[in-house]
Image: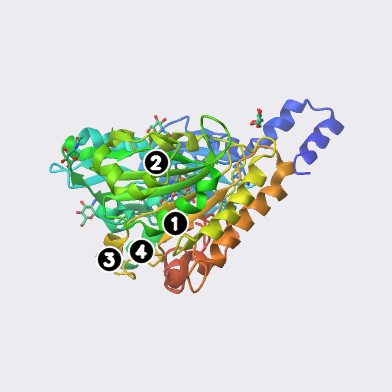
Amino acid sequence: MKLSTPLLWGFLTGLPLVLAGANCNSLAQRLRVELSPHLSGENLISATAPPRWSDFEAPDPGAVVNVATESDVVATVKYCAERNIPFLAQNGGNGWATTFHLDKTGVIINLAGLNEVTFNADKTQATIGGGSNVSNTIDHAYAAGALVVTGNCNCVGTLGALLGGGYGNLVGKYSLGVDNILSLRVVTADGLLRNVTATSDPDLFWALRGAGPNFGIVTSVTVKSYPASEEEMQAWTGSLVYGEHQLEDVVQAIQDLVLTPDMVIFLYLLADPTTGSPAVIAAPFFYGGNATTGKAAYSSLYAIGPVADSTSVKPYNRWNEGSDGLCTRGSFKPGWAAGFQDMVPATWRGIWDAYVAFQKLPGAANSGVLLEAYPLGKARSVASGSSAFPNRNVNLNAFAIPWYNDSSLDAQAAEFGNTARDLLRSTSGLSRPQTYVNFGYGDEDLDVIYGSSLARLRDIKKKYDPNNVFNQWFNIL
Ligand SMILES: Cc1cc2nc3c(=O)[nH]c(=O)nc-3n(C[C@H](O)[C@H](O)[C@H](O)COP(=O)(O)OP(=O)(O)OC[C@H]3O[C@@H](n4cnc5c(N)ncnc54)[C@H](O)[C@@H]3O)c2cc1C
Ligand SMILES: *[C@@H]1O[C@H](CO)[C@@H](O)[C@H](O)[C@H]1NC(C)=O
Ligand SMILES: *[C@@H]1O[C@H](CO)[C@@H](O)[C@H](O)[C@H]1NC(C)=O
Ligand SMILES: *[C@@H]1O[C@H](CO)[C@@H](O)[C@H](O)[C@H]1NC(C)=O
Ligand SMILES: *[C@@H]1O[C@H](CO)[C@@H](O)[C@H](O)[C@H]1NC(C)=O
């Protein structure tokens, strides 16, 4: 219906349809006239943004500003805020939540141009651009000879993951991403570019670390980094594939596994890459491990008898390659997630049944369920109220991703996702539902997402964003 007005108008007046088409781009045209003169370059405005990870209820902008400098971000935020034009920063574009609402009348601020990654002289600090993805950050860190806490998928925005908490392979050694932040350069709702530290703006520093997208656009962040030799940048990782009948044993083994700070384990319900049939896939990670120490650390998983084993020792810049397939852009990929405390075999059998029922539908073969288990001792040595990240008590996170390309499957996708989430919650061992903001579907109550931090976040929101211009990501109201 939205399109019909200009089309009908074009038809009635006999104007060529190309004019009606131009009308659809009017926001981009307007920005070229009004905003471009305030930007660092002449051709920074386009009509479409880089493809997103999921097309399901994806933000649909009327114009895109491809910022090249921090000042471009300042100019764009001021321009949009003053005119009540909705806007959204796009980084890796992996955010799958249904909370975006641009509806052709809003602006995407594409941060991809802000991808600089630099290190201080002794490599104890890294400064990461607001638009650097995980592979770009790791490539620079590997070349510099330092480790940085990032997410585990190459296509994810480094800061997109970090600002919500930041789980990754090095969490056991160095704690969550947010715990490594030293300062952030942030454009706030008033159009100021601030250098935010624990002492300069303690409230904002607290809020950005867990609920960042509600408070500003981070143009760069300075985090702790950890100098490491080539030898110290190796890990043993890969995947162990099991048959369906081994599901309960694998779930129990993960439940019983004691993760040292060097270990991480993922569990995927996913099509076996070689056969295409639904499979149970464990993905162990062991920092500094080799085939001997890795197999010993995960001996209980080996005892079950995997049908395939692709583990090997890999350098830092290849640790994430096992998940590159999950980075494929496009198609519908809504995600239903929950945090929980224990791996319960009966729960996972129920999730399996929901997964295989959906996965066999036409075009849905790539669908999956993903569980992440990190060693959390280090993260729990950091005070739980020290940042807005509210989930230090949560042991495990999992999410179901129906992956399909025909909207006639929407209802079945939702049934699969809700069934998986309900099952996880039913045996969560938590006193109330808790979901990591970066894994949320978008329909959760705000206290499920922000938990005990919500009241203070609301106060800080009133102070720094009184007109609620940063309103696209699990909006704090
Ligand atoms: C394949 C895959 C793998 C994942 N792996 C991990 C993982 O290992 N660890 C983990 O913690 N999470 C992981 N996630 C979840 C991930 O953290 C979220 O999807 C996150 O929202 C993605 O950030 P993005 O920048 O890629 O997405 P976007 O959609 O670009 O951004 C998500 C939200 O963050 C905001 N944002 C992004 N950058 C900035 C910035 N510089 N300043 C202010 N706001 C910003 C955006 O405006 C948007 O509201 C994964 C997700 C996927 C799809
Ligand atoms: C990451 O960003 C770099 C540029 O900074 C780009 O060349 C690369 O294709 C991106 N990789 C992924 C996996 O998105
Ligand atoms: C931000 O402030 C901190 C503390 O004052 C300082 O060390 C750092 O250099 C500043 N960063 C930038 C980019 O201005
Ligand atoms: C694996 O690592 C252990 C401990 O660091 C070491 O003793 C052993 O020699 C290594 N084995 C191989 C095959 O490299
Ligand atoms: C949808 O998925 C099916 C099966 O995977 C594939 O053959 C088809 O090309 C896909 N269509 C689109 C538009 O991506």
Q: Nearer the viewer, mark 2 or mark 1?
A: 1
Which amino acid does the dot numbered 4 rest on?
A: Leu
Q: Quadrant of ligand 4?
A: top left
Q: Is 329 on the left or on the right of 170, as rendered?
A: right
Q: Which mark is residue 395?
A: none
Label 4 secondary element: helix
How far across and how far down the image is residue 150, in percent? 34, 46
The residue lying toward the viewer, choosing from 3 and 92, is 92
Q: Nearer the viewer, mark 4 or mark 1?
A: 1
Could you tell me how far apart the alpha carbons at marks 1 and 3 are, in whole angstroms?
Answer: 29 Å
Label 2 beta carbon within 8 A of ligand 1: yes
Q: Which tag, 2 or 1, sits closer to the chain's start?
A: 2
Label 1 secondary element: helix
Q: Nearer the viewer, mark 1 or mark 3?
A: 1
Disc 2 target residue: 131
Disc 1 target residue: 252
Q: Which tag, 4 or 1, sits closer to the chain's start?
A: 4
